[in-house]
Amino acid sequence: MTKKMKAALKYVRENMDEDDMTILKAEMNKCYKMHLVPNEDVMNCSNVIDLLEEYGQENDLPEGWWMSECEMDDILLML
């Protein structure tokens, strides 16, 4: 994982509302219990995506920069 991605994940952790993070983690647990891979197809990941894009804007990165760095299921696991 690149330094840029590590910094972006830290940014997401620090800026996501605590309640939203709790809901996200609960949705991830539900996915695992149902034997599903937690990603944007089965979960609402809009808060995470918005924060990744916000980080990208603040650091002069192109839109969607994070998609070439990591898959959403990996990102969710690292939060």
Image (cartoon, grey):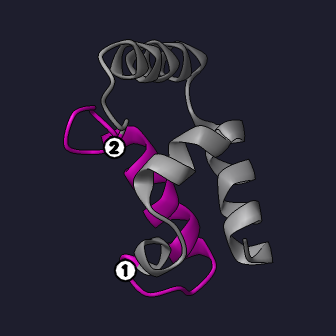
How packed is label 2: few (under 14 Cα within 10 Å), some, or many (20 or more)? Answer: some
At x 52%, y 67%, the residue is 70
At x 76%, y 63%, the residue is 7
Left or right: 2 as drawn, with respect to 30: right
| SS state under label 2 | loop
According to the picture, the residue beneath numbered tag 1 turns out to be 63
How packed is label 1: few (under 14 Cα within 10 Å), some, or many (20 or more)? Answer: few
At x 37%, y 36%, the residue is 38
Q: Is residue 15 above or below residue 17?
A: below
* Three-letter amino acid code at the position of disc 1: Glu
Q: Which mark is residue 39?
A: 2
In depth, the one of 45 and 74 nearer the eye is 74
* N-terminal label among 1 and 2: 2
In depth, the one of 31 and 7 nearer the eye is 31
At x 55%, y 51%, the residue is 75
Q: Which residues are magenta?
A: 39-64
